[in-house]
Image (cartoon, rainbow, N blue to C red):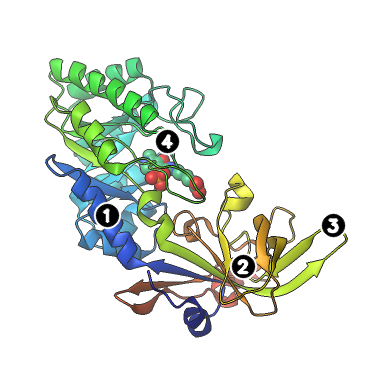
Amino acid sequence: MNIDFSSLAAKYGTPLYVYDFDYIKNRYLELKEAFSGQKNIINYAIKANSNLSVISLLAEQGAGADCVSIGEVKRAILSGVSKYKIIFSGVGKSDDEIKEALNLDILLINLESEDEMKRVESVAKELGKIARISIRVNPNIDAKTHPYISTGLHDDKFGVEIDMAKRMYIYAKKSSFLNPVGIHFHIGSQLTELEPISEACSIVADLAHTLKALEIDIKFFDVGGGLGVVYDDELTINIQEYADMIKNATKKLDVTILCEPGRYMVANGGYFLTKVLYEKKNNKKRFIIVDGAMNDLIRPSLYDAYHKIEAIGKNGENSIADVVGPICESGDFFGKNVSLPQLEHNDLLIVKSAGAYGFSMSSNYNTRGRAAEVAVQDGIDRIIRKREVFEDMIALEKEFLV
Ligand code: LLP
């Protein structure tokens, strides 16, 4: 990585997201390589970063997409992902979304409840189609991650229990409008231990064996996403060990492995650039007030997530400060007790590991336009999303002003 952040900030302004496309591409290729020897599709979880150019970069390499709304499905198709590599998951799909997904003829609709299965069946019947489905199994395993992003326990709203899954498969097999070809689990995000994934994988593989014995032909074995990344000094999962564990658990099943990484692919390929507006000290604390805010990158506010923050081109003695945004909430911060040199108006800070769940979770809170996004590939930078301006933010309201 050799990105001249100061030039990019000068050229495009701040706050700004910058993505290292070479890094993102390599992450995909490395994971793909780890699964070699086994049929597989890497279904990039586009919620992590749904910029069309990011999806397109991965689609060009052959990636599929894991989507959680029809909007994401359409983004994937528009970006060049093959429809036969698209999965549509999520606990609450509307009838309209189901209809569109069936009409688009994507690879799989991933079911999360019995009720939903019946909805999909009746919509498929209405359309005269057969829905290819998978079922998300909740294996009741503690993924050992932040409670907001843990999804594999019976306390969580996701998936169905093993027995229910079995009943659903038996029902679907008999239905003229459902074709149960996939099985799925996803126990959480930012996972740094292999053990819980491995446990979940073997529980779900056992179920797949049982289903095969019932002549329910599972062709796709979806291991979800969740691979953790380094934000600070975490020890993360070795992807070869991860892939080998999955290959091993599924070796007698003759299935295509589907894997849905989001964060793994993009987190550390993304940088959030923000400029210093002011420094402020009281008798207790030093605050660095920057032009970016929680509407741009909400992870620190929402999960107390750690992101490394560095000052560009500054030396001098460091002292501790909170890096905060202009929003009217005390939760509007990027980092607490960060060690930084003395800073001045217009000095540049970089918030690292911002490629996943950064821009995609941003909002217009406080009527702040979303940041611009820039890609750097082979040493060349280009804008991939314009900075939002005031007119963009009021476009859907203006005509109703009386
Ligand atoms: N598959 C399913 C079914 C998911 O629910 C998720 C993430 C993924 C794949 C991708 O997970 P990943 O590989 O990125 O860990 N906003 C939170 C993360 C929420 C994750 C939601 N589901 C954050 O900023 O940490």
**Circle 1: residue type:** Tyr
Instruction: Give the quadrant of residue 340.
Output: bottom right
Q: Position of residue 232 (x, y in %)?
A: 52, 50
Q: Which mark is residue 91?
A: 4
Instruction: Give the mark toward the camera: 2 or 1.
Output: 1
Give the Cα distance between marks 2 and 1: 29 Å
Give the Cα distance between marks 4 and 3: 46 Å
Q: Does 74 sit above or below residue 242? A: below
Please state which of residues 373 and 289 is positioned toward the viewer in this rendering: 289
Residue that numbered label 1 is attached to? 28
Instruction: Give the mark toward the camera: 4 or 3.
Output: 3
Q: Does 103 sit above or below residue 343? A: above
**Residue drawn 36% across and 24% down?**
114
Q: Does 240 sit above or below residue 356? A: above
Picture quarter with the N terminus: bottom left
Residue that numbered label 2 is attached to? 292
* Circles 4 and 2 in contact, beta carbons < 8 Å: no
**Circle 2: residue type:** Gly
**Circle 4: residue type:** Val
**In this picture, residue 40 sits left or right of residue 267:** left
Image region (quadrant) for ligand 1: top left
Give the Cα distance between marks 3 and 1: 46 Å
Q: Which mark is residue 284?
A: 3
Instruction: Give the mark toward the camera: 3 or 1.
Output: 3
Instruction: Give the mark toward the camera: 2 or 3.
Output: 3
**Residue drawn 40% across and 39% down?**
90
**Circle 3: residue type:** Lys
Q: Position of residue 348 (x, y in %)?
A: 59, 75
